[in-house]
Amino acid sequence: MRGAAVLLSVLLFATTCHSVFSFVEGLVENGNFELSPKQSDMKGTEMIGRYALPKWEISGFVEYIKAGQKQGDMLLVVPEGAYAVRLGNEASIKQRLNLTKGMYYSITFSAARTCAQEETLNISVSPEWGVLPMQTMYSSNGWDSYAWAFKALISPVEFVIHNPGVEEDPACGPLIDSVAITYLYPPRPTNKNIVKNGGFEEGPYVFPNTTWGVLIPPNIEDKHSPLPGWMVESLKAVKYIDVEHFSVPQGRRAVELVAGKESAIAQVARTVIGKTYTLSFAVGDASNSCEGSMVVEAFAGKDTLKVPYESKGKGGFKRAVLKFVAVSTRTRIMFYSTFYTMRSDDFSSLCGPVIDDIKLLSLHGT
């Protein structure tokens, strides 16, 4: 469904009136902030007035940042286009979205930490909300893209990105750029695969011009997973990668386990006690200079399999199978990477083995 032109209607605050806009799956209105505020609504880099930022409503100390702008000795990088916004203490940006009630959606946005070390962001779509931790930066350029999913319980909804931080310097808040939305279609098991969304083809929006994938935060931060069918367990995120920028074993999408045992993906599958099952999957590398000896650990209930993979960092994969007998009507399937890995061309970027094409089948005659 990725590539499908999904039409959404969005109800947004404009500077003087409420307008209705329609757009294809992707950026929300002025989601890349390239529509600039008027000079009369600016005081230095700060935007003045609730509707200073076109198509958005702002609250608190919100700055309009141009690519290449300096903060002391630090150069502020903008990942796409020429502009981003920075949220100061307790500042927020808000847009009203007219969505289909009962449907699932995923928001993707890019964010960068500036000088604060313990940054978090509050994401909310009324009445749901989540807190995304930004202590761990996974890309060395300072920018990561994050996904957050929700079910539209009402419509229209208010979508808010809020910086709850209280720093001595309000200019230490996070930078935000490129805000997009997509539908999520809840997957179903089939007679060819008991695992749902085993190829990860259903997932969050991936920006076509970014090369760092999308982080899917742990489920403790997210009631609805941006990776339908799967839970992200433990403390750290996993990375959702696309075939346009990475080596993917099968199809167009895969998952990179970027934080060792601290990031795991899991799914509970329906099984029949006493039946024999095979859990097959692909393990590889994303062709992103992630080199060395890697191990993916697979779990099916109490059965485990360790799959070693020697990565040259240039793409490639191998297949593995875990055979087990179900001891419960619900069997937990889980994967994580045994080790932490850093990219060989960039020792500040976390990386890891790629997992894809996960299939769970019962053996006939058991």
Image (cartoon, helix red, strand yellow):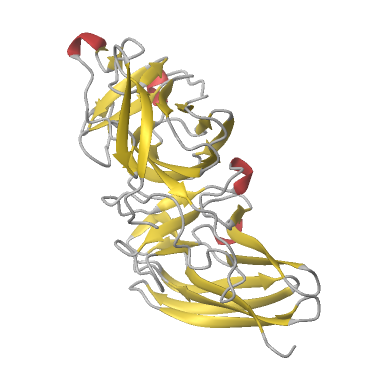
Left or right: 163 as drawn, with respect to 315 = right
Q: Is residue 121 above or below residue 222?
A: above
Residue situated in front as seen by the camera: 162 or 102: 102
Left or right: 308 as drawn, with respect to 114 = right
Q: Is residue 79 above or below residue 19?
A: below
Q: Is residue 324 above or below residue 189?
A: below
Q: Quadrant of residue 230?
A: bottom right
x then y, percent, for residue 338:
58, 67
Residue situated in front as seen by the camera: 305 or 341: 305
The number of discs equals: 0
Q: Quadrant of residue 93?
A: top left
Residue situated in front as seen by the camera: 55 or 77: 55
Q: Residue at x 29, y 26 (%)?
A: 71
Q: Quadrant of residue 252?
A: bottom left
Q: Residue at x 52, y 62 (%)?
A: 340
Let me know if residue 126 appears in the view.
yes
x then y, percent, for residue 305:
64, 78
Let me know if residue 142 appears in the view.
no
Q: Residue at x 53, y 47 (%)?
A: 217
x then y, percent, for residue 206:
36, 51
x then y, percent, for residue 258:
49, 59
Position of the C terminus, as image quadrant, is bottom right
Position of the N terminus, as image quadrant, is bottom left
Q: Residue furthest bottom?
A: 365
